[in-house]
Image: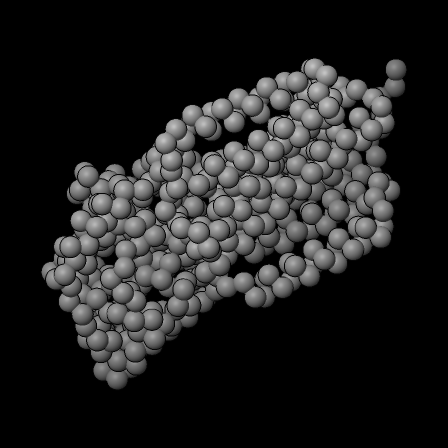
Amino acid sequence: MTEALATPVDYAYLVTGILFIVGLRYLSSPKTARLGNRISALGMLIAVVATLTQGIVNWYVIGAALVVGALVGIISAQRVKMTAMPQMVAIFNGAGGGAAALVAAGELLKVYNAGNIPTYDISFTSVLSAVIGAISFAGSIIAYLKLQELMTGRPITYPGQQIVNAVIALVILVAWGFVVANYDAGIAGGVLTWFWIALAASFALGILFVLPIGGADMPVVISLLNSFTGLAAASTGFVLSNNVLIISGALVGASGTLLTVLMGKAMNRSVTNVLFGAFGSAPAAAAAGGKKQQTVRSVSADDVAAMVAYANQVIVVPGYGMAVAQAQHSIRELADQLEKRGIEVKYAIHPVAGRMPGHMNVLLAEANVPYTSLYDMDEINPEFDRTDVALVVGANDVTNPAAREDKTSPIYGMPILNVDKAMNVVVLKRSMNSGFAGIDNPLFDDPKTVMLFGDAKKSIDGVVAGVKAL
């Protein structure tokens, strides 16, 4: 018995796998992230070209798909604002899960339409890919709707919710087992009907799985659904005997799972608590907090300019409000003006600030803020005690002292940026509305805190003008 020799396609897939791993490694640092993207894109190009050389597709179909996909990608990259990037990630991730489910379904249908009975490995992995892909697709759509505020960001719960989900999961498992066992029980359509039942139930579970999760937890959910899509792709790789799909899917699944765990740890909450805790569903806590926030002090841009211009150290705390106002370039200009006066400026980055992992890092990198000025939560928290001014730009929940002090708060125990330890705190907000978590922030009542209301970009521009005038 002779061993089959590796083909050029096999070598191309090996190179692709190596490039994916190297690219992922470079993505772990803001300094090398762009290079990591380019390396990974090169690997994807090699994989696509190698796959097309096998003659398994209709060139007219693949050509049309490439044109449509390229147009969607280019238009999205040019038109989608950074504030909407989490929504786009959710949509693209859902598309990946849906594609994996469709490919697995198509492969299973091809076997049955040829009059053959699929082997256990094909039937098992086909259903596995379809189930995970459908859950990822449906869940990503709900995440998109919540982030886009086309539906409420608060958890949507109902009596017996977990029981309903458990019953649906049981239906999926039973239908899955019947497909693998090739058991038709005389039903119309035979085994394939069980497959469609599993697929439909998975779609429903994906919707019901994300509905009870609050908007504040969407970054964690997106990361988890991303790992689901990776697992679906890896399973599809087994169905198609495609090594590069297995490698890339496993990488996405593993990195997504790791990121999910790390983000949960950053919030001092387990992944199960995020998924089943219905965080933010108790509006009473927010309502009670709202009655206390009546002692805030409002100041002008010139007042803030005087505070920061005569400070020794200023820490900027960016949040989603900065992304909405596109204030990152103005903040960079303010930092430049302060550094000319010998003032040290640092940026405090909370792991879950914004609405997706790394949201603030990307925005500040867009404004050419030096990577050496960005500090994560553990590095920067000891610095607040010796900081003259903490400038909070649109951040809310990640600066909320209730996480440390109020055991009744839904976010109690979540690690936060200790901005309340600074000598002075300036909070830039449009209004006194609560943050994404739907709870009030007692930081605003602190005697050392002042509020600069208005659009963050215009406010910072006013502070810059004030500093230049001093």
User: Quadrant of the image for the C terminus?
Assistant: bottom left
In this image, 63 relative to 413: left or right? right
Number of callouts: 0
Which of 192/357 is in front? Answer: 192
In this image, 400 relative to 6: left or right? left
In this image, 395 relative to 127: left or right? left
Instruction: From the top left corner, tell me how far across and down residue 332 is, in percent.
Output: 38, 69
The structure residue drawn at horizontal position 59% and vertical position 62%, both measured from the top left corner, is: 77
Q: Does the rendering let one see residue 423?
A: no
Instruction: From the top left corner, tell me how far across and down residue 439 is, in percent.
Output: 26, 50
Which of 299/58 is in front? Answer: 58
Instruction: From the top left corner, tell me how far across and down residue 57 is, in percent.
Output: 83, 44
The structure residue drawn at horizontal position 79% and vertical position 48%, both measured from the top left corner, is: 49
* In the rendered image, the vertical position of residue 183 relative to residue 165, given as above or below: above
User: Quadrant of the image for the N terminus?
Assistant: top right
The structure residue drawn at horizontal position 30% and vertical position 50%, both measured from the top left corner, is: 438
Please say which color scheme the image uses: one colour
Which of 177/89 is in front? Answer: 177
Instruction: From the top left corner, tell me how far across and down residue 382 is, in percent.
Output: 23, 49
* In the rendered image, the vertical position of residue 140 relative to residue 456, given as above or below: above
* In the rendered image, the vertical position of residue 256 relative to residue 447, given as above or below: above
The structure residue drawn at horizontal position 62% and vertical position 46%, both measured from the top left corner, is: 95
Q: Does the rendering let one see residue 108?
A: yes
* In the rendered image, the vertical position of residue 352 relative to residue 183, given as above or below: below
Which of 254/432 is in front? Answer: 432
In this image, 143 relative to 157: left or right? right
> Hey, which residue is sitting farthest bottom in the picture?
469
- The image quadrant of residue 451 is bottom left
